[in-house]
Amino acid sequence: MLGIDDDASITEPSTGMMQLTASDLLIEGVHFDLTYTSMKHLGWKLMVVNLSDIAAMGGVPTHAIISIALPAKISVEMVEELYDGILQAAQTYTCAIIGGDTSTSLGNTVVSATITGEAPVKFIKRRNGAKPGDKICVTGNLGLSHAGLKILLREKQRFIESQAPDGFQSQLQEYSFAVSKHLAPKARFDISTIAAQQEWVHSLIDISDGLVADVRHICNQSGTGALLYANTIPMDPLVGKIAGEFNENDLDYALFGGEEYELLFTIDPDYEEEVLRIMPGVSIIGEITKEKGSVSLQQRDGAIKNILTGGYDHFQK
C-alpha cells in the first residue's frame, strides 16, 4: 500500500495467508570477497539467500527491505551494480523492494536483506516434521558451490602471486558452471511450491550450512537421526574434477560444502515414486532413523560411518 519515501512501508497481508519473514546479513571478509565477487553478484546473492529461506518454509516471496553500510572505497558505479543484482533477483522472483537504509562504514562492506513471504497455514513446511522411516530427498546436484569457491580462491592466489597483475588472465572458463553456482545461486521455488502442497512432505529446509549440517538441523528439531547413502548423493562430474585437482574427496564437497541453496526434505516412504514423478531433478539420498541426533553415512563400499561434525559454523573464526 505504501513503499519507499515515508517513515515506514505499509503492507496488507493476503486474506487467509500466514506471513513468513527471513533475514540475512552478508559481511565482506566473512561471507564474501570483493576480489572475485562482483557487486552485481553480491546483490543477487543477498536476495537469493533470503528468498531460499522463504522457499524452505513452503512460501512465496512478497516484499524486501535492503540495508547497506559502505566504506569509502565503494564507488557510485559499484552501488549501482549492487542494486542491479538486487533488482534482477527481485524481478525474477516477483518480490517488491519497499524500503531499507544506507550508512557509511568505517570498515568493510555490509549488506542486509529482510524478505517477507506468505503461505496458507496448511502449506507451511518446518524442520520439525521428520519421522523415522521417512526418505530424505534433495534437489539438484551438491558440491558445486564449494567447488566453485575453491577455484575462485585459487585464482585469487594466482593473481596475488602474478608477476604482471595488469595483464593477469583468469582461468575460469572450464569451471564456469561451478563458479556460477557459488556466485549466483538460485532459489528453488520450482520445487518448493510443489512440495508445499503435499501432505506426505513432512519437513523441509534449504542447504545453506552444508548437507550434513542441515540434515542435523532437521534431526535436532524432529527428535530423530538420519542415514545418508553416499552412492545416491547427486554430484555433477565437475565436482569430481575440481576435487581431484586439489587432491580432495569429492564426497566431502557434497557433504560439508554449504551455500548450495538446494532443498532438502523428508517424505513418507510410500511416496518415493510420486516424488520422482512430480518433482524433476529430485534424488532420494537417505532415510530418517530413530537414533536421536545421530547422522550416519553408508559409504560407497557399504560400510556405515557415524558423522560427528561438519558444515558451516556461523561463529567460527
Image (cartoon, rainbow, N blue to C red):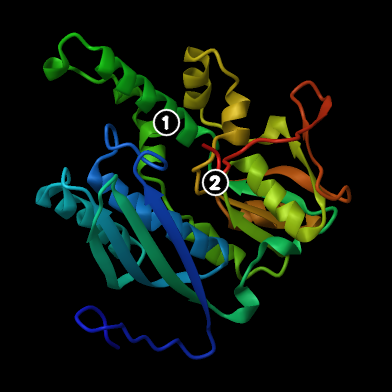
Which quadrant of the structure image shows residue 158?
A: top left
Q: Is residue 198 above or below residue 272?
A: below
Q: In which quarter of the image is the N terminus?
A: bottom left
Mark yes or no: residue 95 visible: no
Mark yes or no: residue 153 visible: yes
Q: Along the line of sight, which residue is nearer the eye, 7 or 193? A: 7
Q: Which residue is drawn at 41% across and 41% down?
A: 30
Q: Along the line of sight, which residue is nearer the eye, 271 or 44? A: 44
Q: Where is residue 58 in the image (x, y as percent from the top left)?
A: 56, 67
Q: Which residue is drawn at 55% across and 37% down?
A: 142
Indicate the secondary structure of the residue bearing disc 2: loop
Q: Residue furthest top?
A: 163
Q: Where is residue 293 in the image (x, y as percent from the top left)?
A: 80, 48
Q: Where is residue 195 in the image (x, y as percent from the top left)?
A: 61, 63
| Left or right: residue 296 compared with residue 251 | right
Q: Which residue is drawn at 62% across and 42% down?
A: 211
| Left or right: residue 116 compared with residue 69 | right
**Residue 149 shows which numbered tag?**
1
Three-letter amino acid code of the residue under disc 1: Leu
Q: Is residue 97 above or below residue 154?
A: below
**Residue 1 shows which numbered tag?**
none
Indicate the secondary structure of the residue bearing disc 1: helix
Q: Which residue lies furthest to the right in this view?
A: 290
Q: Residue at x 61, y 74 (%)?
A: 123
Label 2, on which residue?
Answer: 314
| Left or right: residue 79 compared with residue 55 | left
The mark lying in front, picked from 2 and 1, is 2
Q: In this view, does 80 lie above or below 178?
A: below
Three-letter amino acid code of the residue under disc 2: His
Q: Where is residue 297 in the image (x, y as percent from the top left)?
A: 76, 33
Query: Alpha-carbon neighbours of circle 2 within 10 Å: few (<14), some, or many (≥20)?
Result: few
Query: Alpha-carbon neighbours of circle 1 within 10 Å: few (<14), some, or many (≥20)?
Result: many
